[in-house]
Image: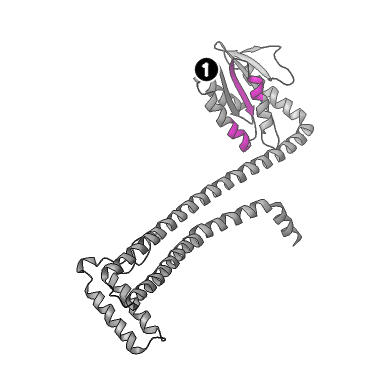
Amino acid sequence: MKAFLNWIVQNLSHIFSVIGILLSLYFGVWYVPDWLAENQREKIINAQKNLEQSIKELVFADTICSYNEINILIKAKELEISESYPLEPNEVLIKVQESFMQDRFLPLLKRKQLMAEIENIKKQIPSTNIKPKKKESNKAFILGFVSIVLTVLSVVIGIVSYYLRYIKEKEKDEEIANQINQSENLLNHVDSALSYENKMISVIKNFPGVKLIENQKIDYGFDVTFEYKNKTFYVECKYLIRSKVGLSSFERFVNQSEGLEGDFLFVYNTDLTNMVKNRIAELRKVLFLNTRRKIFLIKASTENEFEVELNKLLKVL
């Protein structure tokens, strides 16, 4: 139980992010479209009630009521609800007849008289006035559809952003853990690192056509510098036991290469962290057209592996 609570505390931000995405999906895909449709239905129901009441007043009055007056009221309601009225004039009058029959305060004889008067109004409806029924609102459908599309789009963007942030945080954690591990290994394996460096230098020294440049090595600089076919090469060797090559080590190598012309070789024996791989991809874009400064990486655990890779590199340059 305690371990579970600790996990919740450590991942609280991720949990809230997931909850936020799910709530956005619910409100955008289900709640908002339903609310829009329900709101439109309420608007139409209220318009029908008001229209029925207005027609009842006209019919109940002693003056003669005509279809033209009814039609004007229907057009006014269409302007009010901003869409075509969902009922035909004949259907509107049927609803009015039903309303009169439910009015128990009127004598039955009076109700029948009003029903007959409405029947006379129905006969005035031109046959060309009949139109297809629109039981559902296109406006509500369109708004609901737009809400769903925008919500799904925002959720997808949110998921992608969350995933990228998670990957970035994971890479940072990996980098920190690797840096700690690397520092511990350096204290215990200094001799192994020097041996690895000397072996790589020996391979370079014995490569046909290579000329070492002496007195160029400094503690924070390159391990060896050499010339081959009128080109200058700067080499740094990185030997590790279990940890990967971290961003700080690689950035130090890149910074040391700034201001110099030539080809730069980074030789390592383990693997690269994801942040280093991303940094290499960035550098390749920046240095793609740079003919005076190029960076190469060679992974080699033994002298033979390094000799093979070095031969491949130098033969194509």
Q: Is residue 17 left or right of residue 133?
A: right
Instruction: Label 1: state its secondary structure.
Output: loop
Q: Is residue 131 left or right of residue 208?
A: left
- Image point 25% across, 75% down: which residue? 122
Q: Which quarter shows the N terminus?
A: bottom right
Outermost residue toward the bottom in this view: 108
Q: Could you say which quadrant of the image residue 49 lies in?
A: bottom left
* 37 or 68: nearer the viewer: 68
Residue 144 x %, y %: 44, 58
Asked if 23 appears above or below 289 in the picture, the reply is: below
Q: Is residue 62 left or right of residue 197?
A: left
- Image point 54% across, 19% down: which residue? 314
The residue at which mark 1 appears reads as: 291
* 152 or 184: nearer the viewer: 152
* 141 or 287: nearer the viewer: 141
Magenta span covers which residues? 253-279
Asked if 282 appears above or below 123 in the picture, the reply is: above
- Image point 52% across, 47% down: which residue? 157
